[in-house]
Amino acid sequence: MLSRCVRALCALGALCLIALPTFVWSSPEWIAQTAASQWGLASHALRLGLHNRLLGAAASMLPALVALFVLWQLWWLFGAYGQGRIFTPASVLRLKRVAQGMLCLPLAQPLSVALVGLALTMDNPSGERALILNVQWHDYLALLFGLIMLAIASVMGEAVRVADENAGFI
């Protein structure tokens, strides 16, 4: 039951990560509101021409791609768990990949915000362009969660190794 629930949440998350940016970046009003409330660009003049929006959309997809990778790994991991394949090398590998993805998110998110700020202000006159460095609490939590997941994957890898070794004695 838990496996199916996690897989459904992964599918919903992937759908949102693909669909929502399309809606946000298609509307200059939504971009302006998001830029002011989440990206620290409230005091900057924004250029919302098509090329600025396309560059901003591409930059904003960086953390979305990392998150899609994490969701894909979780999808497969919980599929294996649902079939009872828990302590296997494949499951450990998927768990390590989840951890690696979580460790990439705190890097991808601030880089993405910086690139979006540049994309939306690059046509401004000199001195009015914005390079935003925005590190938030959830970036720290993602880093911490990634490290915890990496430790758990290492412990599971050792458990798989010991189980394989013990199976060889029988």
Image (cartoon, grey):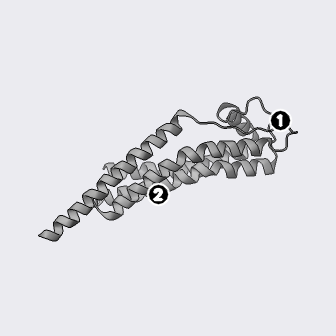
| Earlier-in-chain disc, 2 versus 1 | 2
User: Which of pointers 2 and 1 indicates the residue nearer the eye?
Assistant: 1
Q: Is residue 22 left or right of residue 99?
A: right
Image spot of residue 39 (x, y percent)? 67, 36
User: Which residue carries the number 2 mark?
Assistant: 72
- Name the residue located 44 percent from the left edge and 53 percent from the top edge: 98
User: Which residue carries the number 1 mark?
Assistant: 128
- Name the residue located 64 percent from the left edge and 45 percent from the top edge: 111
- Name the residue located 75 percent from the left edge and 44 percent from the top edge: 118
Rendered view: 102 above or below 170 = above
Q: Is residue 36 left or right of residue 19?
A: right
Q: Is residue 76 left or right of residue 119?
A: left
Q: Quadrant of the C terminus?
A: bottom left
Q: Is residue 115 visible?
A: yes
Label 1, residues with CA under 10 Å away: few <14, some 14-19, many ≥20: some
Q: Is residue 33 left or right of residue 90?
A: right
Q: Nearer the viewer, residue 23 or 118?
A: 118
Rendered view: 67 above or below 45 = below
Image spot of residue 14 (x, y percent)? 52, 52
Type of amino acid at the residue the image marks with label 1: Glu
Q: Quadrant of residue 144?
A: top left
